Amino acid sequence: MSGLLAGRSALVTGGGSGIGRATCLAMAREGARVTVSDLPGAGAEETVALVRAAGGEAHAVHADVTQPDQVAAMVQAALAAYGPLHCAFNNAGIAAMHVGAGGQRMGDISLQSWERMLAVNLTGVFLCMAQEIAAMERSGGGAIVNIASVAGLVGLPGSNAYVVAKHGVVGLTRAAAIDHAAAGIRVNAVCPGYIDTPMITEAMARRGEQILGTVPLRRLGQAEEIAQAVVFLCSDRAAFMTGAAMPVDGGYTTV
Ligand code: NAI
């Protein structure tokens, strides 16, 4: 098979929905064999079916990215299915509303909400990276892309724990890029603006016009547009990129 990721093995967390699903499909179109990971019942099997229907190769794994043993088993499953791991997209994540903290300011957020947000959106990325890096070091290198957000580059109102977690992902990306460059592992982050996925359905219903008013291109991004950036960062076309935090945001962070 030809393509930017021909012959590569790829792992995507949160691959059952939104940006993760679009990226699994895009990676498979570019020739990668894809391990699609998500929580049980969160759509990983459906993504695999879509990849296969399009002529690609994929299999599903269930893992909660906050659980070290499940993350280790997820990476082992990817290795067992497709051999050495070349690409990983650490994409699983939640929004403030998932921890009951939508719109809350720093003084109002509960410790439980704060800890859950950091567990999924920051520690989850750390746990996945640790296993992926160990596997990639054994096989001579690879490319990791972490999902951050525009909230990893600037502040957003009423999203403090989310902003902290995503800034943490950018920091983790930069630190790991330095530490593992000599092992041939590139680590980059993609920083999406507002993307049309289930994660922002509720926010768009509540204040869609206001959100679009903050985006110079005056539209939501599509999951496919993030997928294309991730494929690029995983591919040899980005061979000289590591430690980058790449905005794909319709101009949001330029204002
Ligand atoms: P989504 O809600 O469609 O997908 C998120 C996926 O992560 C789901 O499949 C969910 O099951 C999975 N997930 C959640 N908790 C998990 C856990 N503990 N273990 C394993 N998987 C878990 O949302 P979307 O938009 O595709 O989000 C993907 C990533 O993109 C998230 O990290 C999000 O923060 C980030 N992002 C999204 C933006 C947007 O506007 N949609 C903007 C910037 C970043």
Image (tube, rainbow, N blue to C red):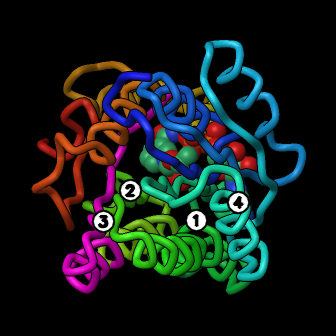
> What is the three-letter code of the residue carrying label 1?
Gln
Q: Which residue is tagged 1?
A: 104
Q: Is the residue indicated by label 3 positioned so its CB lies within 8 Å of ligand 1?
A: no
Are the residues tagged 1 and 4 within 8 Å (C-beta)?
Answer: no
Label 2 or label 3, whichever comes before in sequence order: 2
> What is the three-letter code of the residue carrying label 3?
Val
**Residue 156 appears in the figure:** no
Label 3 or label 1, whichever comes before in sequence order: 1
Q: Which residue is tagged 3?
A: 187
Expressed as whole percent of the image width and height from the top left, the position of residue 253 reads: 20, 46
Q: Is the residue indicated by label 2 positioned so its CB lies within 8 Å of ligand 1?
A: no
Q: Residue at x 56, y 67 (%)?
A: 121
Q: Which residue is tagged 2?
A: 145
Q: Residue at x 58, y 79 (%)?
A: 127
Looking at the image, is mark 3 or mark 1 nearer the viewer? 3
Q: Secondary structure at mark 1?
A: loop
> What is the three-letter code of the residue carrying label 4?
Ala
Looking at the image, is mark 1 or mark 4 nearer the viewer? 4
- Closer to the camera in the image, 19 or 205: 19
Q: Which residue is tagged 4?
A: 80
Q: Residue at x 31, y 79 (%)?
A: 176
Q: How crowded is the residue under tag 2: few (<14 C-alpha within 10 Å), some, or many (20+)?
A: many
Expressed as whole percent of the image width and height from the top left, the position of residue 222 reads: 44, 23
* Separation of residues labelled 3 and 4 (CA atoms): 23 Å
Give the quarter of the image for residue 117.
bottom right
